[in-house]
Amino acid sequence: MDQTKLRILSAAAMLFDQKGYHGTSVRQIAEQAEVNVALISYHFHGKQGVLERLISYYFETLFRQLKELEERVKACPPMEKLEAVIRLYLGFQRENAAITRLIQRQLSVESILAREVMTLYISRWKHGIAQPIEEGIAAGLFRPVSVDHLLLITASQLIYPFMHPQSVRDVFGQEPASPAFVDWLASEIIRSLQSRLCLPYNQER
């Protein structure tokens, strides 16, 4: 993607995060990106197009990294694969916190865009976590739990700190933008998953 488009997307992500989608104008995006306002119409066909491209670029980048990760860890045990995916998702969300919040806000409102995001991207996001869990269950290494139920619990742990960073800072005294927080949270999520999934050694096949 060329630098002009990236500047527009970066400016839009910041403004949408600060002012909300409806509170941001195309002119404000152009001013923040230091481009002619006509370029936004030319490249993205308006503000809605900018939003849709932000979302697609976010998930395309995440899934490219996920595919590369899955290739690297394909010979690893299921729990190691699961930990690697959890750490990838958390690190990616920290690095792209503004867009992560934007997407979650869009998903909280019933709309055509939200349904499209669910259909195109959220199922793939879910599959990234579900796959090593299902592999571990099939191999007799994990308890036969409800994968969807476990994923709902895990998703809330993954998303909440980046959706509500101020409450994490003020109420829990943690800084979700720091690498140390991501490392701590990943370890806690993995510990929680291990307690629900892992069989005692003498019960494994």
Image (cartoon, rainbow, N blue to C red):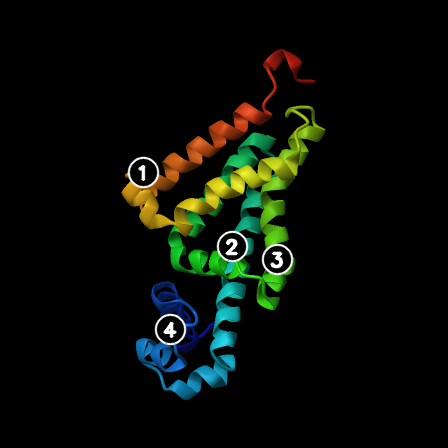
Q: Is residue 188 above or below residue 165?
A: above
Asked which secondary structure carries label 1, the reply is: helix
Instruction: Look at label 3 and name its amino acid.
Output: Met
Q: Which residue is mark 4?
A: 7
Q: Is residue 101 above or below residue 10?
A: above
Question: Which residue is pictured at 62% across the width and 40% down the height?
Answer: 130
Question: Which residue is pictured at 52% across the width and 57% down the height?
Answer: 108
Q: Is residue 64 above or below residue 88?
A: below
In 3D space, how far apart are the residues under numbered discs 2 and 4 (Cα atoms)? 19 Å
Q: Position of residue 22 (x, y in %)?
A: 43, 72
In 3D space, how far apart are the residues under numbered discs 3 and 2 (Cα atoms)? 15 Å
In 3D space, how far apart are the residues under numbered discs 4 and 1 (Cα atoms)? 34 Å
The tag earlier along the polypeptide, 2 or 4, is 4
Query: For residue 143, which numbered disc appears in the image?
Result: none
Q: Which residue is mark 1?
A: 172
Foreground: disc 4 or disc 1: 1
Foreground: disc 1 or disc 3: 1
- Callouts 1 and 3 close, C-beta under 8 Å: no
| Relative side of 9 to 133, left or right | left
Asked which secondary structure carries label 3, the reply is: helix
In 3D space, how far apart are the residues under numbered discs 1 and 2 (Cα atoms)? 28 Å
**Count of number-bearing discs:** 4
